[in-house]
Image (spheres, coloured by chain):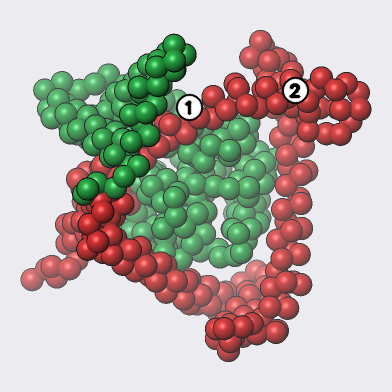
Amino acid sequence: MENPLKRIEVPIFLTGVLILLLLLGWGTTITFLKQTSKLVVNSATLIFSLGLLTGLVSVILGNTKKVLKRSEDWYISAWTIIVACVMFILGIFSNPFGEHVLFTWIFKYVITPISATTFSILLFYMASSTIRTFRARNLDALTLLITTILIMLRQAPIGAAIWSGFGPIGDWILTVPSMAASTAVLFGVAIGGITLVFRLVTGKERGYLRRG
Amino acid sequence: MVLEEGKIAEIILLSSIILINLWWASKVKVSLPTLRKIPAIDAISEAVNRSAEMGKAVMFCPGVYEMIGREGPQLVAGLSILSYVAQLCAESGTRLIAYVATPEVIPLAKESVRAGYTMAGKETEYNEEIVRYSPGYEAWAIGIEYMEKLHTENVGASLMIGPFWSISLMMLEEAYAAGVYQVGGTATYYQIPFFVSSCDYSLMGEEVYAASTYLDKNPEMLGTIAASDFSKFLIMGLIILGSLFITVGFPLISDLLSM
């Protein structure tokens, strides 16, 4: 007999019920619904946190296979396993009311600088993207190019040094047409999101499940 | 009062949008709405076909945000498209590589890919190693790994559809530099310009949510696309009326919306 918990209707039903609970908790003043809604959110956060453990196991297992098979760059996989295990063990022994010195040191002086370095490389990618994109091929592209130059002159100190008018022009572009366009996109995204949630609640959106 | 004060207008608007969706869901049983073609959605199958012809792999990333955040619905849309791409790859015998950035998405991504292979009638060809998890602080690791694999895994097409943040520009530019056919899309509005500048075809904003519906061709789901457009007309009408009223010094609409 088919396991009833494996039926696709179970996650669809749970999704619908939990979304409705969250909406009712958000929109009403009924204490029971508000508390249930808070419980659902806390449970989701807990499941997400436990999911991090799943991720850790997945990383260790995946990299262990590469090490055992001696795949290309297997030593990088070995280093990944060592780092993951060290940080996990240090994290386990962290004082929940304080900090573990070594854990914090590794985070502040190893992980954060590496993240900052990677973030900095973005500048060069942005420059290459800009060089390719801002070309006056037609009227729309020319408008985009001129607007970009005006905004760059507004943002960079050299713009104010050349002419004080770049500031108000740039401010107007940012606060009027740019704000209008981004608000329009946000409206569309918000309504699209509501429609997707409607499809989730009614069980019509099944692409993220087994498409049953 | 049962309804939360300060949220009554939002509740009424939300209820109106839901009613519009329900109305369209019943209307499509009589006649289907005519939807405009979105080139980026057709480009998804073109990307898979091109990779199949060249004997190269397809790389897919459904986003780098968590499921429980504000970008969760985008991730759901991305996973639906992943399932469709998996089906196309299975049918054409193209290798698929899917990258996920958060652990709670791993089982969903695996199920989406498995469903795609099952729909293509090739469930036995499904491999657990299609979905790869790349963890990391602020999703840098998945970006770096994605960029590296674009060059080392013989990739013909890169599909990035879902919620992204700053790492997306690096992934997109690297794919452009590698000469890979790119189809991308995001509803994270400050990332949209990067997708438009680097991708061959891009889905902007709500088109990401509409894409999974478009590909499914289910009439009731197609009705929700028309419903979202109707809802936009409602919002536009309120904005225009509100602007006119407040210009003449009559703040009726703005007072109602702040209820």
Above-or-below relation of B125 to A157: below
Kindly identify the residue that appears in the image at 63 percent across and 26 percent down.
A175
Q: Does residue A40 show up?
A: no
Q: In this view of the protein, which residue sits in the foreground, B117 or B171? A: B171
Tell me which chain the residue with mark 2 is part of: A
* Residue with the mark numbered 1: A184
Q: Secondary structure at mark 2?
A: helix
Can you see residue A38?
yes
Residue at the outermost front position: B249
Left/right placement of residue A197 relative to residue A180 reads left
Query: Looking at the picture, do discs 2 and 1 lie on one chain?
Result: yes
Residue at horizontal 56 percent and vertical 74 percent from the top? A63
Residue B216: x %, y % from top left: 28, 37
The quarter of the image holding the N terminus of chain A is: bottom left
The chain letter corresponding to green is B
Of marks 2 and 1, which one's residue comes earlier in the chain? 2
Residue designated by label 2:
A168
Colour in which the image shows chain A: red
* Spot occupied by residue B95 in the image (x, y as percentages of width and height): 47, 51
Above or below residue A154? Residue B140 is below
Tell me the chain of label 1: A
On screen, A86 above or below A162? Answer: below
Total numbered badges shown on the rendered structure: 2
Q: Residue at x 56, y 35 (%)?
A: B192
Q: Quadrant of residue A133?
A: top right
Q: Residues within 10 Å of mark 1 (few under 14, many from 20)?
A: some
Residue A78's disc is none
Crowd band around label 2 with a 10 angstrom C-alpha radius: few (<14), some (14–19), many (20+) = few
SS under mark 1: helix
The x, y position of residue B98, in whole percent, is 48, 54
Relative to B176, is A149 on the left or the right?
A: right
**Is A54 displayed left or right of B145 in the figure?**
left
